[in-house]
Image (tube, grey):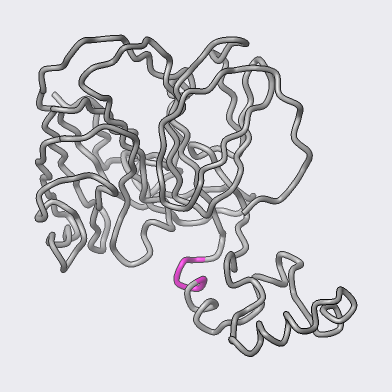
Amino acid sequence: MPQHQAMPKGKEANGMATPPPDQDLRGHVVAPRPSHTGHRVEYDLYVDERQVNYTGKTRLAIAINGQIPAPTLRFTEGDTAIIRVHNQMGVETSIHWHGILLPNQYDGVPYLNTAPIEPGGMHTFTFPLIQSGTYWYHSHTMLQEQSGLYGSIVIQPKAVKYELKEYVLLLSDWTDHPPKEVLRYLKRAGEWFAVQKGATQSYGEAIAAGYFKDKVKQEWGRMPAMDLTDIYYNKFLTNGREKSYYPDAKPGKSCACASSTAAPPRTSTCSTPAGPCRSSPPMASTSSLSRCRSSKLPRPKPTTCW
């Protein structure tokens, strides 16, 4: 039986997408063990279009099993993953298993090493898990990842010496602009997103700030003012929520934070009974697993982190 109960397309298809269940915010207990005998772990993932409303405006997105982000896939090193991806959209799709060491034909990049999953089609991915850590999976078709088609993968090591409660933190961003429009704006090298951010630059401002030479050098290199982070995002999300509260994280208790990000590097704030805590991934499209201790932190000042 699949670990995660699939949600077949039915009356709720094309309805509103939901964030992961509240139960996910209560963490996952990792028990100590000297070793592990591998099992066949199966999942069924149903991809369809859903509506979201993060900003007061309804937009079309892509969900897996009705939720954004997609369900967290949990394994243990030595298991064999059997994942059936059902495409219930009217266009082709794909799933790439980011960072996972696997046979080339299951990598999931369409037209390169895996065939695309056609509308109404299904593709079965079967591969051994020979590593441990926190990773993520996402579409490699068109700009579907930007529309919500991504999720976390957690692979526990064979031997575990500790007992901790583990929390998965998937950091992402959202813009109400359709991804195709975002790409078009970027190719035009316009300043619309900089205007939205209030981050436009002029020679007058550069001279007043003493950065005239830097401004000339930037223009000579044809580098836009916001070249490193040039998209305006309406919302930054943790596990599909703008704000997340973890009621089981008690003061003085240690926990494991499995963090992955489908967004530019930034600092994320979540709340626990001990107060706010912060997570800062080192770079985009990375993952990490670290121990953290729930303790009272000074409340961070409002700031913009990219």
In the rendered image, residue 268, in percent from the top left (x then y), is placed at 60, 39
Which of 117/52 is in front? 117
The question of residue 139 being in magenta is answered with no
- Viewer-nearest residue: 186 or 253: 253
Q: Which residue is drawn at 55% across and 15% down?
A: 249
Q: Image quarter for residue 120? A: bottom left
| Residue found at x 25% / y 43% | 46
User: Residue 200: where, in percent of width, then height?
Assistant: 74, 74
Q: In which quarter of the image is residue 294?
A: top right
User: Which residue is rendered at x = 17% and y = 53% of the image?
Assistant: 107
Q: Residue 246's spot in the image, x, y percent? A: 56, 21
**In the image, residue 19 lies at what x, y percent?**
46, 36
Quarter of the N terminus within the rendering: top left
**Residues in magenta, as a range:** 178-182
Q: Residue at x 66, y 50 (%)?
A: 305
- Residue 238 vs 97, above or below: the answer is above
Rendered view: 69 above or below 114: above
Type of secondary structure dominating the magenta stretch: helix
**In this view of the protein, which residue sits in the foreground, 219 or 54?**
219
Which corner quadrant of the image does residue 143 belong to?
bottom left
Q: In which quarter of the image is the C terminus?
A: bottom right
